[in-house]
Amino acid sequence: MTDVLKGRDLLSLADLSSTELSHLLDVAGSQKRAWGLAGSRSHPLAGKSIALIFQKPSMRTLVSFEVACARLGAAPVLLAGSDTAFSRGESVLDTTKVLERYVDAIVIRTFSQSMVEEIAEHARVPVVNALTDDHHPCQGLADLLTIREHKGDLSGLRFAYVGDGNNMAHTYMLGGALSGMNVSVATPVGFEPKAEIIEQSRSIARSTGASITLSNNPAHAVAGADIVATDTWASMGQESEHASRLAAFETFRVDASLMAKAAPDALFMHCLPAHRGEEVTDEVMDGPQSVIYDEAENRLHAQKALLSVLLG
Ligand code: CP
């Protein structure tokens, strides 16, 4: 299975089959458990270099990829800000064809999904999406690993997402569909996930026994859920819409009364950064059902496993 993933790209979770996703989570879990045991600190990617291109701000993704590289023995090459790769008007083709002569993989956080698809089309090395406006597959891997750790088998779990129909909503729909989960998404009217990603998720769900349900009712989405997740109401690049979004999303806040509608042992998840008091209350963030810091830690383990299998 590891060989099947060698040399591949990860642009969205839909790039993986159910079996491949499950295998990646197995690798991440076993690497995490083994860390610190004899032999676990070998450097399987020694001599390799990995470009980390960040055209949007990041804390968790950047740090966890840098530490993953260090643990694997690979050299991270950070290209961040407005004066580096893909930011000076040079064509995506030229930049990619040059970069692939230097590095063994390209990890990129940018705005449009079409740009990472264009890079992947040209690159002979694996390309990993570290967040676009449409997808956040690395966060999805970490979150599924976290759910597995707390709930065991993913199949049949009820996953509720409340908030903006953004890249995390898309990622949870695809990851849930691949994992056989029943995903219920509640957004305000006009903030629904993209229709083509809903259809893509439902298509996958038909083959795994999963389900994808959309509504504009947070209480319905959360009723009986095993996991409740949310995300910021104004993502990177939407700061100017902050005030209008606050009004539109006011009844979509995850607070104690909404969590009480979920299963008694439901997890609360947030990929962070959170805007405490907006999409979620302190009481939920800091409460006993919250696994937000486990998710953040698992970014490291999931991405280390990902780089291991993509680079062999
Ligand atoms: N969750 C996440 O991607 O965090 P950063 O934006 O800090 O990388």
Image: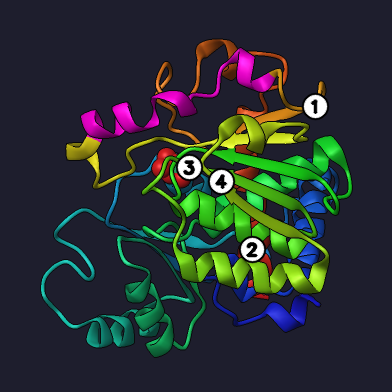
Give the mark nearest the N terminus, 3 or 2: 3
> For the point 52% across and 78% down, which residue is it?
126
**Residue holding disc 4:** 215
- State the SS at label 4: strand
Residue occupying image coordinates x 46% and y 56%: 193
Q: Is there a contact, CB below 8 Å, between mark 3 and mark 4?
A: no
Where is the C terminus found, in terms of image quarters?
Answer: bottom right
Question: Is mark 2 in CB contact (under 8 Å) with mark 4?
Answer: no
- Camera-near label (3 vs 2) is 3
Q: Which mark is residue 263?
A: 1
Reading the image, the residue beneath label 3 is 187
Q: Position of residue 140 (x, y in %)?
A: 60, 52
The location of residue 278, given as percent across then percent down, is 40, 22
Secondary element type, mark 2:
helix
Magenta stretch: includes residue 88: no
Stretch of the chain drawn in magenta: 242-259
Task: List the residue tagged with mark 2.
Answer: 306
Q: Quadrant of the N terminus?
A: bottom right
Q: Is residue 245 visible?
A: yes
Residue in the foreground of this view, choosing between 211 and 64: 211
The span from disc 2 to disc 4 (Cα, nearest Å) is: 33 Å
Whether the residues at callouts 3 and 1 have beta carbons within 8 Å, the answer is no
Front in this rendered view, residue 206 or 280: 206
Characterize the local packing of mark 4: few (<14), some (14-19) or many (20 or more) Cα atoms within 10 angstroms. some
Please identify the quarter of the rendering in which residue 161 is found: top right
Q: Nearer the viewer, mark 3 or mark 4?
A: 4
Query: Which mark is nearer the camera, 4 or 1?
Result: 4
